[in-house]
Image (cartoon, rainbow, N blue to C red):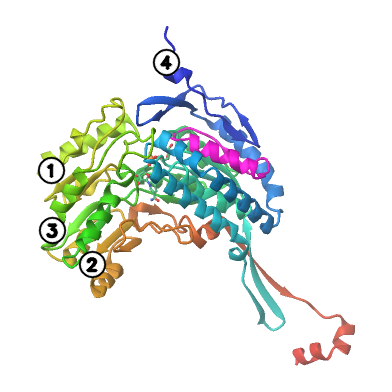
Amino acid sequence: MAVTQSEKATTCKMLVGGQWVDSKATEFGDVTNPSTGEVIARVPMCGADDVDAAVQAAHAAALEWKEVPVVERARLMFKFKNKLEENCEEIARTVTREHGKTLPEARASVLRGIEVVEFACGIPSLIMGESIANIARNVDCETIRHPLGVCAGIAPFNFPAMVPLWMYPVAITCGNTFLLKPSEKVPLSSLLIAELLIEAGLPRGVLNIVHGGKECVDALLTHPLIKAVSFVGSTNIARYVYEKGTAGGKRVQAAGGAKNHIIIMPDADMTQTVQALQASAFGCAGERCMAGSLALPVGEAGDMLVPALAESAAKMKVGRTDTGDGPDMGPVISADHLKRVKGLIDKGVNEGAELVVDGRKVSVPDAPEGFFVGPTIFDQAKPDMTIVREEIFGPVLSVVRVNNLEEAIRIGQDCPYGNGAVIFTSSGRTAREFKHRFNAGMIGVNVGVPASMAWFPFTGWNHSFFGDLHIQGKEAIQFYTQQKMTMTRWFATSDEKFHDPVWKSRRT
Ligand code: NAD
């Protein structure tokens, strides 16, 4: 019997207590190069036993790691940052190979991840507590931030290097140990990056990696030694992870899916707007939680925007990304996802939206097995259509024409998500009104993708986030630490009371 591609492919190891080890799993998933459909690795679907082994290793390491001075933990991050920079190109190529985004997109995403490590290098200044002398007479009060213990991170497929880097550099520098479960579709970038962290001097057990899907996630969510879980993925799973994790007493931050509105006022700079909107809707093949997937041109802006955008989008070169810097857009992640995206385009047509650019027609002759769909634009979409309500997570932009800003704000109000929203305008007053009132947590003014950078929290609202403290920025430090308040009073000895004039004056 012929050996399948999957059987020939290398099986990913777990990282447990500083060792690369085999999982006990009997089921495996395929990691695929989306440009070609070729299986490039096998990933074990870890169960409770594997998770427990990794948690025990993290727990054993936690006692010592939390006592390492925070400045030393930050120094590890400095070394890690250097390693990431030295190996940025190799990481980006791995991201492209397993995810399919173009190399420039992959490089940019790795740089965004490195910025989180830069942020972590500054944690000694940011983790400081607060204090007040004499909060009551002769009583001093202070708070000190302590790590939680073992934390876990569960990542989505769309940013194989960046999203895991949102999580563990901050958690670890705060003094926690960590279990990472990368997406089973794209585990290779995380494994490569973990090698670099080990080379930088990571003590055993401080970062551990397990693989898999629901069974593995459930084992993480119910393990009594895990204190906190960071999750990034689709809304239904985010809600599930939040509910199950918090029911078990864990701290959970769970970022979900999105549908991001781009409002275009008639006074916008149309050339800049078309460029930014194209990048926002079709960058990373639309597989971004901050992708602008709904354009809401106001009044005559629609007639200026749609033809220009359609012309420009139709010229985008779609192709395989694993052989160079070539195309403007790569494939989507899998054959199943391709089918879903195309199905939603069919639905848009059936529900009556006007298909202006049809990505279903795209063909890539040198990669016939790749998962390609081209940029797609619907005009005259209506708020109740599926393509407007659902996150498509592909290169599909729906244009809903509105009469005024008020109407756009109302459409935003009805949207269950709330990650990002953008306005293009040259009016400061209109921009202010939009910024103040629009129903989303990350706002752009003449910026296509207002994704928070490492120093700011990733402030999704509504069903785009479940929890209290967001990922990234100072909120991440709050998430990964617990405060201890100490109230102190020292009594003077009788001798001190007699001789010390300061003490005497303070008592009177
Ligand atoms: P996903 O929800 O399918 O998977 C995310 C993680 O959950 C993976 O690690 C996966 O193994 C695990 N998982 C999958 N099914 C599960 C189940 N039934 N029970 C428990 N765990 C399960 O998401 P995805 O397709 O990998 O990523 C795309 C989604 O992520 C999009 O919805 C996108 O908007 C979202 N996303 C959100 C943000 C954000 O910051 N809000 C950032 C990136 C991606």
- Which comes sooner in the sequence, label 2 or label 3? 3
Q: Is residue 290 visible?
A: yes
Foreground pick, 89 / 470 = 89
Q: Amino acid at mark 3?
A: Met
User: How far apart are the two marked residues, 2 and 3, measured between alpha carbons?
Assistant: 14 Å
Q: Quadrant of ligand 1?
A: top left
Residue 210 spot, x, y in % from top left: 54, 35
Check if mark 4's residue and mark 3's residue have beta carbons within 8 Å.
no
Magenta stretch, residue numbers: 186-213
Identify which amino acid the numbered label 2 is placed on.
Thr
What separation in Å lies between label 4 and label 3 (alpha carbons)?
A: 52 Å
Q: Which residue is mark 4?
A: 4
Name which of mark 1 and mark 4 comes first in the sequence: 4
Q: Residues within 10 Å of mark 1 (few under 14, many from 20)?
A: some
Q: Residue at x 23, y 38 (%)?
A: 374
Task: Point out the frontmost of discs 4 and 2.
Answer: 2
Assign a secondary structure to mark 1.
strand
| Quadrant that contains the N terminus | top left
Label 3, on which residue? 304
Mark 4 or mark 2: which comes first in sequence? 4
Q: Residues within 10 Å of mark 4 (few under 14, many from 20)?
A: few
- Tell which circle, 4 or 3, labels the residue nearer the N-terminal end: 4
Q: Secondary structure at mark 2?
A: loop
Look at label 4 and name its amino acid: Thr
Q: Is residue 385 visible?
A: no
Of the numbered discs in the image, which one, if any, rests on residue 355?
1
Q: Which mark is residue 425?
A: 2
